[in-house]
Amino acid sequence: MAGSVSAAAYATLLDRVLHDCERSVQDLNVEELNHLPPDTNSIGFDVWHAVRTIDNIVFFVFDREQPVWLTGGFDERFGLPRVQQGTGMEPEEAHALRFPEPAAFLEYVQAVRAACVPRVEAMTDAYLAESVLLRPWGERPRLQHIGQLMIVHAMGHVGRASFARTLLGHSDLGF
């Protein structure tokens, strides 16, 4: 049944993750978004990776449709990889990525939020229970992929962005 408790709960959590992605970058300038603390990634990378992962799983992994990243032309607009989303990327390659002005970057985050949250909310229990292959994590029910990668994994990246904000003199995200 559409809008099941599981789907509604996961959609609410996903909305929170993407809202926190927005909060991570909205008051930064382009230099801060791209700042590289020692031995780690930029805020831009962590947020981009989290949002790209969500976008890619909801559209491509689950339904073999093009993600918002491609349908919105964000890869071309930002001059960032068309397919790669950061998973398994070598540190040198990740550190070399340059992210656009935060206002433009937020357009992508907001487009993913607008497309993915209602889509997850409308997923049926049967659809969520179906197993799909997601490399390198394996074959699992969609609900587990949502919980592990789109919520828990993404919030790890948002947590790093929150900490990096404090290193730049901004407030953390309060969690």
Image (spheres, rainbow, N blue to C red):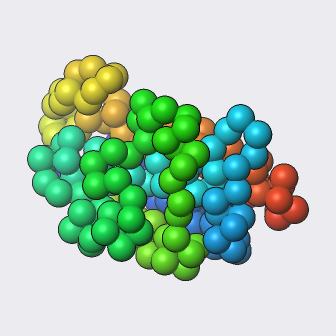
Say if residue 23 shows up in the picture.
Answer: no
- Give the image location of residue 43, x and y in percent: 64, 54
| Up-down relation of residue 72 to residue 124 (above or below) | below
Which residue is at 31% across, 68% downward?
A: 76
Which residue is at 52% across, 70% downward?
A: 100
Which residue is at 65% across, 63% downward?
A: 33
- Give the image location of residue 111, x and y in percent: 37, 71
- Give the image location of residue 170, x and y in percent: 82, 64
Q: For this rendering, which residue is in front, 165 or 39?
A: 39
The outermost residue toward the right is 169
The outermost residue toward the left is 64
Left or right of residue 42: residue 170: right
Which residue is at 21% across, 41% downward?
A: 61
Which image quadrant for residue 62?
Answer: top left
- Give the image location of residue 85, x and y in percent: 38, 46
Say if residue 107 shows up in the picture.
Answer: yes
Which image quadrant for residue 172?
Answer: bottom right
